[in-house]
Image (tube, helix red, strand yellow):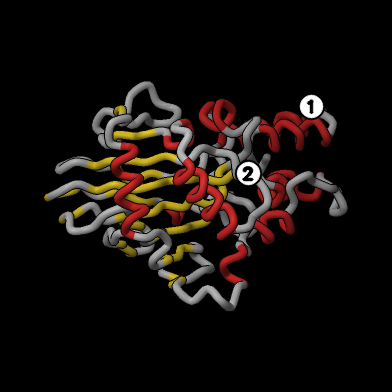
């Protein structure tokens, strides 16, 4: 709860003192992206212990148990850090070299400057280019999207479109989170209806470049791009709170080019 702003803490106190009905308070907090555990801690003894939330702790614990962690036949997954801190996994040979080359060829003519969610400009923060692969009517893209969805097997929030990103020499994406901060205009605009981001799947489409590592700065984990390798992480804790340990940095490419596929998941359909 240390990440809840004083503005929201004061809002809760003000409404409790004013006698605002608890369902009204909890609804507003939930609509602004605060998870059940945080709402309980904000309201303390004012909230009955048996109060039922649409998205409770058990819901997020299930999201923290993706299918690939429970299939004995999958033996190419490596956990990159303490799962209690961040669920972060590398999956070798997720795509073949042929598939990687095909996606690069498909996306290369449809690139446009990457945008920064919730900001008028990405200048100086995110300098890559993006291709909206989902709109290209490609059987290969559809197949890859389905493969990612089935690999995680979450059963919810699978509709955010798959993208490709291209980084040329010197390009980067400064340290950032993939989740939308609760209680902010950014959350209301991008997550109130569609839900908070949960898992991220990123697949490296080439290697041989210099630089371009994906660096989880708080965890001290730096992943070197390798063709066909997928990187997956849960942007939330297993109680549904944004996990600030997921801060990550697409480091500058110092030689060559870097291409990736990215797909995000949500906690709503």
Q: Which badge, 2 or 1, comes first in the chain's sequence?
A: 1
Give how far apart the Cα atoms at labels 2 and 1 are: 37 Å
Which of the 4 image quadrants contains residue 10?
A: top right
* Image height of 119 relative to 91, above or below: above
* Image height of 195 relative to 56, above or below: above
Mark 2 secondary-structure assignment: loop
Residue plotted at (69% across, 52% down): 37
Residue plotted at (23% across, 58% down): 207
Query: Looking at the image, which is closer to me, 37 or 71?
Result: 71
- Residue 166 position, x and y percent, is 28, 41
Mark 1 secondary-structure assignment: loop
Looking at the rendered structure, which numbered label has been put on residue 107? none
80 horizontally vs 153: left or right: left
51 horizontally vs 267: left or right: right
- The crowd level at tag 2 (other Cα within 10 Å; few <14, some 14-19, many 20+) is some
- Residue 153 position, x and y percent, is 63, 57
- Residue 254 position, x and y percent, is 13, 49
Could one spot residue 125 in this view of the protein? Answer: no
* Image height of 81 relative to 236, above or below: below
Which of the 4 image quadrants contains residue 70?
A: bottom right
Which residue in the structure is indicated by mark 2?
Answer: 157
Q: Residue furthest left?
A: 255
Position of the C terminus by quadrant: top right
* Dot 2 and dot 1 residues touching (CB under 8 Å): no
Looking at the rendered structure, which numbered label has been put on residue 18? 1
- The crowd level at tag 1 (other Cα within 10 Å; few <14, some 14-19, many 20+) is few
* Image height of 220 relative to 59, above or below: below
Residue plotted at (18% across, 58% down): 208
- Residue 183 position, x and y percent, is 58, 34
Residue plotted at (56% across, 49% down): 198
103 horizontally vs 39: left or right: left
Q: Nearer the viewer, mark 2 or mark 1?
A: 2
């Amino acid at each position: 709860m240390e990440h809840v702003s004083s503005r929201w803490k004061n809002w809760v106190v003000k409404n409790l003192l004013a006698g605002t009905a608890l369902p009204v308070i909890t609804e507003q907090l939930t609509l602004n992206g605060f998870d059940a555990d945080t709402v309980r801690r904000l309201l303390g003894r004012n909230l009955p212990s048996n109060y039922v939330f649409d998205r409770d702790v058990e819901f997020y614990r299930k999201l923290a148990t993706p299918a690939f962690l429970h299939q004995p036949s999958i033996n190419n997954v490596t956990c990159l850090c303490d799962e209690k801190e961040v669920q972060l996994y590398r999956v070798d040979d997720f795509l073949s070299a042929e598939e990687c080359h095909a996606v690069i060829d498909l996306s290369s003519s449809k690139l446009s400057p990457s945008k920064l969610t919730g900001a008028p400009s990405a200048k100086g923060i995110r300098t890559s280019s993006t291709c909206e692969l989902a709109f290209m009517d490609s059987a290969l893209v559809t197949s890859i999207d389905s493969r990612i969805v089935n690999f995680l097997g979450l059963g919810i929030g699978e509709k955010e479109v798959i993208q490709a990103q291209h980084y040329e020499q010197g390009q980067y994406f400064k340290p950032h989170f993939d989740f939308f901060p609760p209680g902010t205009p950014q959350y209301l605009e991008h997550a109130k209806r569609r839900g908070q981001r949960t898992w991220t799947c990123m697949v490296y489409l080439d290697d041989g470049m210099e630089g371009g590592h994906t660096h989880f700065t708080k965890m001290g984990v730096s992943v070197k791009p390798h063709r066909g390798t997928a990187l997956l992480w849960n942007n939330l804790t297993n109680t549904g709170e944004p996990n600030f340990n997921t801060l990550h940095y697409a480091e500058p490419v110092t030689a060559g080019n870097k291409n990736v596929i990215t797909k995000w998941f949500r906690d709503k359909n």
